[in-house]
Amino acid sequence: MAVCIKSQIQNLNLVIGCTIGCTYCYARSNVRRFRMIEDFEKPEYFPRKLRLMEKARPQIFLLTGMSDFSGWRQEWRDEVFAKMADNPQHQYLFLTKRPEEITFSIDLDNAWFGVTVTSSREKRRIAALREHLRGGHYHVTFEPMFDDIGEVDLRGIEWIVIGTETGRRKGKFVSKPEWVWNLTDQAHALGIPVFWKEDLLPILGQAQMIQELPRAFCRVLEEQAKWRK
Ligand code: SF4
């Protein structure tokens, strides 16, 4: 049975707001609808939420569900990285569409830095990720896919996520099965786990669904299961 990625990875929106301006952004719509912050184009930091990272029960957190990591100020990053170092029981995911605007090096084994690639023109982001963000682990999210991404250089990447556009946007793109398989096959040839988001279910069918996780994430989920017993 296909699982919803949100049942495994929790959003922890320490920063809300983003200047990138994607047309398909669900975060901007939600922020405006629920008036979470004054202006989505002016990211705000919510340090009080850091205490959620103190929970002993391990979790996999996505810290950029309503922001882009390139929009985080240096002082926010420093504070969050320090908190991550103090709470190694969790795994932490970050995503950006502008890796070339961030340069740093950290020594945290539970940090996962990733880029979003939505078309073949954006593949250069993967090389920029390796070049500019040093330390931790790398992942790539191909979502939503607007064309066939083609051949990708996945060296050093430890997880890929693939998804199609969701929501009700007029002119919404639907990923083609061959685009999904192309990326999946390339990742599998390198032994990289692949996660198809549940939105691909109507396109690819239950029997084919692939939802693999890195070993570190599997360990977190196994630990979580023990807490429920
Ligand atoms: S990068 Fe993410 S948060 Fe920013 S506008 Fe695009 S979809 Fe929204």
Image (spheres, grey):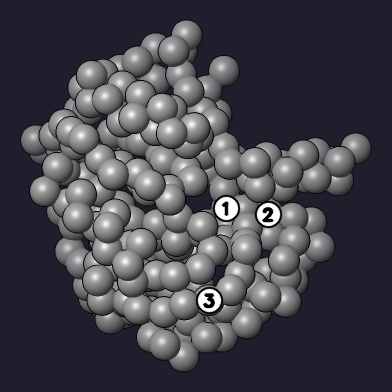
Residue situated in front as seen by the camera: 71 or 111: 111
83 with respect to 178 (left or right): right
> Which of disc 2 and disc 1 is earlier in sequence?
1
Q: Residue at x 58, y 41 (%)?
A: 214
Q: Quadrant of the C terminus?
A: top right
Q: CA distance from mark 1 to mark 2?
A: 7 Å
**What's under tag 1, amino acid-wise?**
Gln
Disc 2 target residue = 59
Looking at the rendered structure, the secondary structure element under dot 3 is loop
- Badge 1 density bin: few <14, some 14–19, many ≥20, Cα 10 Å: some
Q: Residue at x 77, y 39 (%)?
A: 222
- Badge 2 density bin: few <14, some 14–19, many ≥20, Cα 10 Å: many
Q: Position of residue 60 (x, y in %)?
A: 62, 53
Between marks 2 and 3 in the image, the one whose residue lies nearer the viewer: 3
- Badge 3 density bin: few <14, some 14–19, many ≥20, Cα 10 Å: few
> Which of disc 3 and disc 2 is earlier in sequence?
2
Q: Which mark is residue 95?
A: none
Q: Is mark 2 within 8 Å of ligand 1?
A: no
Q: Residue furthest bottom?
A: 75
Residue situated in front as seen by the camera: 218 or 182: 182
Looking at the rendered structure, the secondary structure element under dot 1 is strand
Q: Which mark is residue 106?
A: 3
**What's under tag 3, amino acid-wise?**
Ile
- Determine contact: label 1, label 2, CB under 8 Å: yes
Q: CA distance from mark 3 to mark 1?
A: 23 Å
Between marks 3 and 1 in the image, the one whose residue lies nearer the viewer: 3
Q: CA distance from mark 2 to mark 3?
A: 21 Å
Q: Which mark is residue 10?
A: 1
Q: Quadrant of the N terminus?
A: top right
